[in-house]
Structures are given as structure tokens and as C-alpha cells.
Image: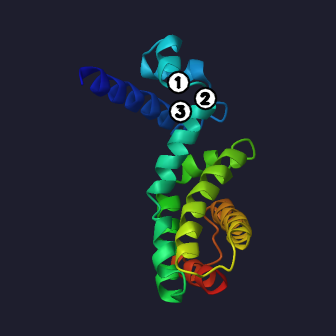
Amino acid sequence: MVNDIRSRTTKKMIRSAFHSLVEDGCREVTVRAICAAAGISRATFYAHYSDLYDLIAEDEREALSQLGLEDFEHNYRDTQARAEIFLRILTHLDENEKMYSYYLSVHEKYFFSLVLRDIMTSVSEELIRRGLFSSPEKARLSVLYHASGLLQTLCQWLEYGKTKPCSREEYARMLSEIA
């Protein structure tokens, strides 16, 4: 049990150091930089993560799990509920803009899209159980299509920066109408 607490504490230190580097504007985050910021050895880092991408993938999964995408499975057909979900997502993006800009940079977009697709796949499985898709393949195609579109609209929102063309509420409403 002490080992579990120690392991969770070390992972939290590593992730905190990673976040600090990104928040400080570091574009080339390395294991060496994370270790220096966390005050740990590289061996300690590698005892918890196989590489930098393992850390990023875990961090992305954690961040995406906070977005509430699983709510889509319960509110897929309700435009107002979808708008509220999109608003929650956009608010979360704005509050964590530097981290998501890092995740969605050209270098990291591939990993982020895989994590997003995995979450959307679990949503589609629920929709299949409810009989909303005629086949598993149609459900998979729908997930790929929607995950790609969602990823691009989230990237676009972040790229707007301070010159966003409309409010979060308006953007969320537009997304909900086309989703």
C-alpha cells in the first residue's frame, strides 16, 4: 500500500512538472527536462512511464475524461443537451488553453486523436446497444467521422486565440446543430 501511495505521488510529481513546462511555454518537452523540474532521476521516470509518449497519452486520457464526452451517449439526439456538452468542452479548453494547444500541436495531434477516438468508441458502443446503428461497422465509421470533425473544430477554437469570431455559447450552439 505504501508503494501505491509512493507511486501515485511520484506520477503526480512527474505530471505536475510536465504541466509546468508546458504552461511556461516550453515547446520541446523532454524526459530530461521533466526529471529536472520534478527533481527525480530518469530511472524513476522510466519506472513509471515507458517514454514521454506514455506520459502524454495518460495525461491526455485524464484530460479528456474530464470533458464529459460520455454524456453524448445519453443525450445524442437532444440539440440543447449537446450544446451544453459542447459549452462545457469549450470552457474546459479555454481554462486549459496551453495544455490543449500542446496536445493539439502538429506533433501531438495524432496521439490526442487516438485518445479521443477511444472515448468516442465507448460512446458508440452504447449507441449500438440502443439500436441507433444498423451495424458495428456503421458505428465505427460514425465514430471516426465525428471524432475527426470534433478534433478539427476544437483545434480551430484554440487557433482563434483571443480573436474568436463568436462567444463560446454561440460556437457550442452551432456545433450542436451540426453534430
Where is residue 137? Give x, y as percent.
73, 68
Query: In what element is the residue under mark 2?
Result: helix
Three-letter code, disc 2: Leu
Distance (Cα) linking label 2 and label 1: 9 Å
Q: Which residue is mark 3?
A: 21
CB within 8 Å, label 3 to label 1: yes
- Amino acid on which disc 1 is placed: Ile
Q: Secondary structure at mark 1?
A: helix
Q: Is residue 158 above or below residue 103?
A: below
Rendered-image quadrant of the N terminus: top left
Residue occupying image coordinates x 59% and y 63%: 120
Residue hosting label 2? 52
In three-dimensional space, the C-alpha distance between marks 3 and 1, rounded to whole angstroms, equals 7 Å
Of circles 2 and 1, the one toward us is 2
Q: Answer with mark 3 or mark 1, whichever residue precedes in sequence.
A: 3
User: Which element type, helix, strand or loop, lies under badge 3?
Assistant: helix
Q: Is residue 164 left or right of residue 93?
A: right
- Figure quadrant of residue 159: bottom right
Residue 34 marker = 1
Q: Residue at x 50, y 19 (%)?
A: 45
Q: Position of residue 10 (x, y in %)?
A: 38, 24
Figure check: 165 above or below 42: below
Tag 2 near tag 1, CB within 8 Å? yes
**Nearest the eye: 128 or 50:** 128
Q: CA distance from mark 3 to mark 2?
A: 13 Å
- Indicate which disc residue 69 carries: none
